[in-house]
Image (cartoon, grey):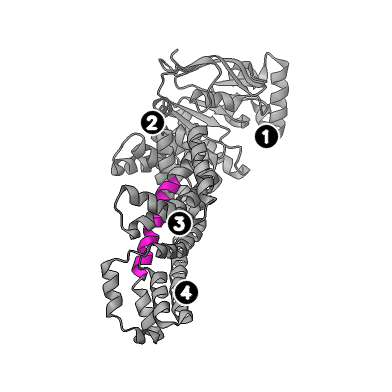
Amino acid sequence: MFRADSLYQAVLNTQNMEQLQNFGLLVYYLSQGVGVTLGVTVIALSTGMVFGTILGIMRVYGGPVLGGFAATYSMVIRGIPVIVVLFILFFVIAQFINLSPFLAGAIALGIASSAYQSEIFRGAIMAVPPGQMMAARAIGMSRLKAISFVILPQAFRLAIPPWSNEAAIVLKDSSLVYVLGVPEILRRAQYVSARTHEPFIAFAAAALLYFVLTFLTNRGLDVLERRYRLQM
Amino acid sequence: MADRPIVRIEELHKTYGETEVLKGISVAVQEQEVVVIIGPSGTGKSTMLRCINLLTRPDKGRIWLEEQEITDPHTDVNKIRQRIGMVFQDFNLFNHLTALGNVTIGLTKVLGMKKREAEEKGMWELERVGLIDKAQSYPAQLSGGQKQRVAIARALGMDPHVMLFDEPTSALDPELIGEVLTVMQKLAREGMTMLVVTHEMGFAREVSDRIIFMEHGVIVEDGPPKKLFHDPEHKRTREFLWKITELYGKDEAETA
């Protein structure tokens, strides 16, 4: 039932599976899925950030209608397992546009993440002191300008620590798109496991790769956090 | 002083919930006039100030800025506020921007100035408040007095026709108050029209042209400082001034 693309098939066929019992080669083989994993993660996080920011703004400044919509959206999405969101959206999106499993999976993860990110940005926006908005309006900024040039730049800085956590979660959740046949790390590990009957080695190698990626992501964001720490 | 009101307020009312904070305030401020508003806390001084630049919407009454009625529902509030500088008690500097950035953001994003032009003007405004060497400092790196002077520079950058000061020195350590008052005094000398809510009686006595004493949402007394300090019409004004000068420096009251 999986629609593995032809390139993926070609890669698999040229591999000598016996060699994969060598752990180094195994990691090398899996690491070819790192690009896909990172691709899914980056697209999901960016999609989630764009919508999460808009929803977060709606929550704080949107009034009862827009704010209520954003709150409901967040509540519903967060009340459903990510994999169920993934399935629903994959089959819904596939009905309207012909998207690759890669893109459909990434966007679906992004939509799930947008609900979580909207909570992060809502909290961060509310953590910006109210006097900032007042001062921005007092020099003649419209509400939209005040949000864009005064509130959001500060909210984004405040959001970095919780956002790093969300980035790590999405990175790991990107493994879920394996169910759509996307050749990322886990999908490759599963394939190796089936061929070599060495599930422990295959999944341990996948675990190692995920750990390294998550570790590096967190360290990278730590640097960003220190660089842009906001003192009030 | 020409009879040309910059701000004119007529029968201003404001109610928060059950509490009527302003019960019909009428005041006119002439060009270049420095008006100090005093009174016990919770009597609507700040609310009145905030009504003037519409940060607070009055329930009733009308306000004119120069020839324009700003309480007209069709008024573009963003345009109005560009002509009114506001300085807050707790500074409210933009925390993510340098001192210079705080002054230039209004110039570039509101007035649409080019970045270089805005920076030139920004540096000039910082010089006016004596902080040119702090241009690249962030608010967290500045003292309270320096923050407030940057906030004044930020307001001045928009070339306001009138400046509103909402207890500008109340959040400052005593030794930092002087530097802010000096800047304000300089502005007054340069002919800036100013409305100042403050408890600084020295400033009121030396710099203001008029003192307004407010209590319970009404103006109790309005007159030149000499008159209020020496021969107030109302007993309540005398009591209040006596109390506040006792708190904030007795000699000032005696020499006034």
Label 3 sits on residue: A228
Query: In the image, are marks 1 and 4 on the same chain?
Result: no
Subunit that carries the residue with mark 2: B
Q: Secondary structure at mark 4?
A: helix
The magenta span reads A34-53
Chain ID of residue with mark 3: A
Q: Are marks 4 and 3 on the same chain?
A: yes
Could you tell me the amino acid type at mark 3? Tyr
The percent position of residue B151, horizontal first and vertical second, equals 48, 39
The residue nearer to you, when weighing A225 against B223, is A225
Mark 1 highlights which residue? B248
- Residue found at the far front of this picture: A1
Residue A4 higher or lower than A162, as above or below:
below
Image quadrant holding the C terminus of chain B, namely top right
Q: CA distance from mark 2 to mark 3?
A: 32 Å
Horizontal side of B239 relative to B214 (left or right) equals right
Task: Mark 1 and mark 4 in contact? Answer it, CB < 8 Å.
Answer: no
Q: Which residue is mark 4?
A: A207
Residue pointed to by mark 2? B159
- Between disc 2 and disc 1, whose residue precedes? 2
Residue B217 lies, with reference to residue A229, above or below; the image says above
